Image (cartoon, rainbow, N blue to C red):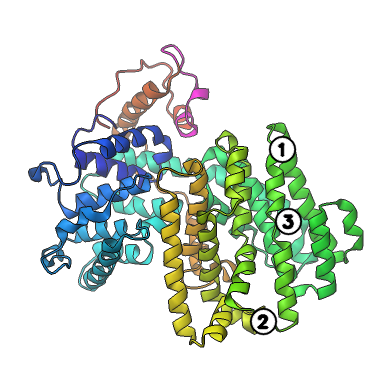
Amino acid sequence: MGNISKPLQTLDFIDAIQRLGISYHFEVEIDEILREMYNSHCDFNNGDDDDHHNDLYTISLKFRLLRQQGYKISCDVFRKFKNSQGTFSDSLANDTRGILSLYEATHLRVHGDEILEEALVFTTSRLEFLATHSSSPLREKINHALKQPLRKGIPRLEARHYFSIYQEDPSCSEVLLNFAKLDFNILQKQHQKELSDITKWWKELDFAKKLPFARDRVVECYFWILAVYFEREYALARRMLTKVIAMTSIIDDIYDIHGTPDELKLFTDAIERWEITAVDQLPQYMKVAYKALLDVYTEIEEAMVNEERSYRVYYAKEANQVRAYYLESIWFHQKHTPTMEEYMAVAMVTSAYAMLAATSFVGMGSVVTKDSFEVMVSGPKIVKASEIICRLADDIVSHKLEQKRGHVASSIECYMKQHGTTEQETVHEFRKQVTDAWKDVNGECLFPTAVPVPILTRILNLARVIDVLYKDEDGYTNAGTALRDFVSSLLINPVPIFEFESVCFKSKLYVYLNKYLNKRIITSSTKHPFFLSFTATLLLHNYPLHNQTIKKPTDQL
């Protein structure tokens, strides 16, 4: 990768690797290149115009890649594209590639990036026009970007979508594309096995029969957590967090739908005690849920003891939100509509996002330290922002249904009553607040960060799930066509890999693996698969290299 000499080619190559979902294999190499670009004296405003280093597409792409990587690049680099009236130049209108690139870059904006606010309005308007005056496949590409900006999309879903786009790109590398597809399918097999194990656990609990009022959503729960982390090394973390979110969904329904005030008081006290003896005071249906909850955390604790990280379970338990659930139930039974301030103080907790964030760190390995937990449970801006995104986006699409079935007043009702606004005005205001919360998320991901980037990525991904699942409806509760399609694309249907068995492709794959192995071997005489990534190991099993001489890495794939 480092031998790609031209800046634009390098940027395009990194973008392709990231969008194809295989950048986790090349994190060190990508960081080295982008850090060098950031530190380079050859900034945005310099370069060779003949190589198109200063066009809208290139500058927007470079800006986005560097901001994604955590570098504080000023958005002033886009001022050169404005005219004397201070608006974006009409000459850009027909630069569809550049407009799309700038549009994606605007979603990395933080507070104070006024030029990116203007750019978002400009690019959105232009893309909406182009979408109605373009033919396939450009029309589909534009519509997808307008519906799901890359920054807010679930990386695994975006990779699956990008395969078909990249293969039509004139610069498409067959080796890179097929490697990405193979990598996707290999991981999908692992994810299927994990889901099978979790589904077996869920069926043994038999909640569908014992708690028929509760949502039966274990597959959707696994999908949610798969969006938080898909990499092989996070298998334990996925199992733990999926079980926690599945139990959280059950407990939420007990408070929202079924429990009486007296029962909920007993249930709240029992959960805060975290003792099996507390089960005796509960009604039968609560005993089932309570014991299952304790079993999940016991399993987590045992796993952490084996890794000598038992302290982490304390933070996961402390993040539970049942006291807030209980307060919401009191409001409902008393028919109390709180002020917006009262509501948000409680509802941000019942969004469960602070709890899910803390629990997501438990199984992440050595990158997480006790200091990291202390920082993240102290209520940092990025966690609060993710809670706001979750709470408001959820209420916007679900409040009507919840009010019909009987639920505590949502943020919509609270705001309308307090401020005398219409529902439409309230939704408009909340969308602005969600947008501002996304700016907080983006800002907290820029260097210097309070905790390592892999930890922040979990919170970013939690926010992304909300943008995808709650864009038009409560995709979790309703589990409509969109969510079923998402689940199918990630967990059921493998990616077709054409010409995989061709001699030509095998040859190119060997060249790629030679390069990969040369970078990964520990010593000149050690080529044991233990030292390779999971994907490379399985590739070697399918296409053994042990009888071949490892050649000098090629400069190009």
Q: Circle 1 is placed at which residue position?
A: 310
> How busy is the neighbourhood of tag 2: few (under 14 within 10 Å), some, or many (20 plus)?
few
Q: Circle 3 is placed at which residue position?
A: 203
Toward the viewer: 290 or 428? 428
Mark 2 vs mark 3, foreground winner is 2
In reply to whether residue 529 is colored magenta, the answer given is yes
**Residue 492 seen:** no
Q: Are marks 2 and 1 in contact (CB under 8 Å)?
A: no
Q: Is residue 517 left or right of residue 8?
A: right
Q: Secondary structure at mark 2?
A: helix
Toward the viewer: 541 or 39? 39
Q: Earlier in the sequence, mark 2 or mark 1?
A: 1
The residue lying at 34 percent from left, 63 percent from top is 144
Quadrant of the image containing the N terminus:
top left
Magenta segment, which residues? 523-537
Q: Secondary structure at mark 1?
A: loop
Quadrant of the image containing the C terminus:
top left
Q: What amino acid type should be assigned to the residue bearing mark 1?
A: Ser
The residue lying furthest to the top in this view is: 525
Q: What amino acid type should be assigned to the residue bearing mark 3?
A: Lys
Image quadrant in which you'd find residue 207: bottom right
Q: Circle 2 is placed at which residue position?
A: 405
Location of residue 278 in the rendering, given as x and y in whole percent from the top left corner = 88, 57
The residue lying at 22 percent from left, 61 percent from top is 99
